Image: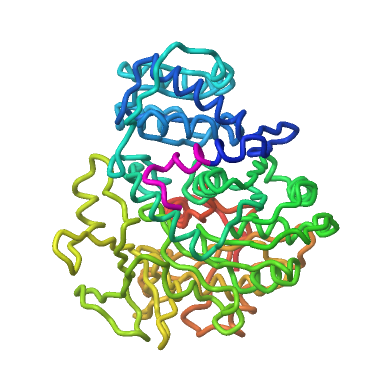
Amino acid sequence: MRHALLHHAFEATAARLPGKTALVCGTRRLAYREVQARVQRLASRLCAAGVARGDRVVVMLEADIEYAVAVHAVLRIGAVLVPLAPTTKADKLAFVIEDTEASALLTEARLEATWGPARERCAGLRRLLLAATFDDDADADLPRDEAAAQDLAALLYTSGSTGRPKGVMLSHHNMTSAWAAVQAYLGLRESDVIGLALPPTYSYGLYHLLMGLGLGATVVIERQAAFPVKLAETLEREAVTVFPAVPSLFAALLDTPAAARFDHRALRIVSNAAAALPTSHIERIRRRWPQARLYCMYGMTECKRISYLPPEELERRPGSVGRGMPMQEHWLVDEANRRLPHGSTGQLVVSGPHVMQGYWRRPQETAERLGPGPREGERVLYTGDLFRSDDEGYLYFVARMDDIIKTGGEKVAPREVEDAIHQLEGVTGCAVIGVPDARLGQTVKAYVTLRADAAVDARAVIRHCQARLESHMVPKTVEIVQALPMTESGKVRHAALREAEPTRGSDSA
């Protein structure tokens, strides 16, 4: 991907493959020429409304064709994309509009209960455009020199599991660099059909939308991902070849017997990011889709992707996320910021052209995350994640530094306990946190979700852990819950569990 600006690849593809199917959503199918025409019309409407280069535009739309059109229209005029999920609450929407001083909001009529109150609070918002009007004609000339590679392309707001959300500043150069590196190892093709069941408002889903339309692939937007059988049916009907997912999505497909009857032999690439994939899931995925190459990946919004494990290494290195990504450098540091050799455990630090510019109008938070690099003028990203590396430099996620549990002088990584619990038949998900304890400082607690037919209770989980883990790692309490709090990007919100812990009852042992 050699284009200087994020949307140039799509424009080149639309000119080269005008009649090819670009987007599929339910019964709707649009060719590249049709998508491009809609992008041009919406871009003209934004220009006519006075939206200019560098202005921030909030896009709060369902995962649909209109969302894909809006993304490319905003980029086309040199504005800054600020995507938000359609489930965003009014307070957060108002906060983001005010924080970014957004010029326009692109949304839909059915979300008025959210954008109505937010609009009243945000006097600076000059224009609101509804999806139903995106195709209306507008008499406005589009700018020729719409942006530069160092201009901001997007502000991606973090999920805000603790504190107020932060806008991650990504330039066109940041995002095209990340795209090029991911493309270098995934090897997506023009002939691919990408099954997008992920929210395209978050980095993982957004990049697959951009990459797919930039390469000339067909992107199938699946809005019924909450219904595993519907999703499995779509994968078969559209002969999907690339399926990016998160652990909860894989678990839903694997744990629904009716989903197994569909023919998914077209799948050639399956990938996981956002949250770590339990090793038990890896084994089941490989059995379900043996012909597909499974990529276990690690990344964060602040730089898109950091590492991936080549599929041929899955058996030799279960649990690893690889040795980094093309076009970047990375290393581990100790608490004194000293570089560590292979075979150590420490915080992961990343350097490369994909690293964000910082947090929007958050100088203190930016300074905490970005630091000086080994080269003059370079800034590197301190991920806040603990990893260990083996003797060959392969990385293994240990924990978010804030999530480490300290109990009786020992440190416990939640991921290690979660992996053990996932091996218990009938478990569909789990999250492990530390809870206050007067004697030990903290004790280990596990929240567990189960299949409907699972004959498992809290005591069975504890006995299972006692047979596999050191004593200080075994949960003292287990709570069986219907669901775990999740971000829309697919990560368990451990902080939410910690915050709610004093007020919740439990089915525990």
Q: Nearer the viewer, residue 91 or 440?
A: 91
**Residue drawn at 42 percent across, 86 percent down:** 392
Would you place residue 252 above or below residue 313 in this image?
A: above
Q: Residue furthest bottom?
A: 391
User: Is residue 189 visible in this depiction of the protein?
Assistant: yes
Examine the image and state in which quarter residue 6 appears. top left
Residue range in magenta is: 1-12
Q: Residue furthest left?
A: 376
Left/right of residue 456 with respect to residue 480 in the rendered view:
right
- The x, y position of residue 92, in whole percent, is 41, 33
Render colour scheme: rainbow
Examine the image and state in which quarter residue 287 appears. bottom right
**Residue drawn at 48 percent across, 53 percent down:** 493
On-image quarter of the C terminus: bottom right
Q: Residue furthest front?
A: 16
Q: How many numbered badges does the structure rendering display?
A: 0
Q: Nearer the viewer, residue 193 or 231?
A: 193
Would you place residue 91 above or below residue 330 in this image?
A: above
**Residue drawn at 57 percent across, 40 percent down:** 16
Q: Nearer the viewer, residue 492 or 443?
A: 492
Q: Is residue 263 magenta?
A: no
- The x, y position of residue 394, in whole percent, is 44, 79
- The x, y position of residue 150, in whole percent, is 28, 44
- The x, y position of residue 132, in whole percent, is 59, 18
**Residue drawn at 31 percent across, 74 percent down:** 331
User: Is residue 459 visible in this depiction of the protein?
Assistant: no
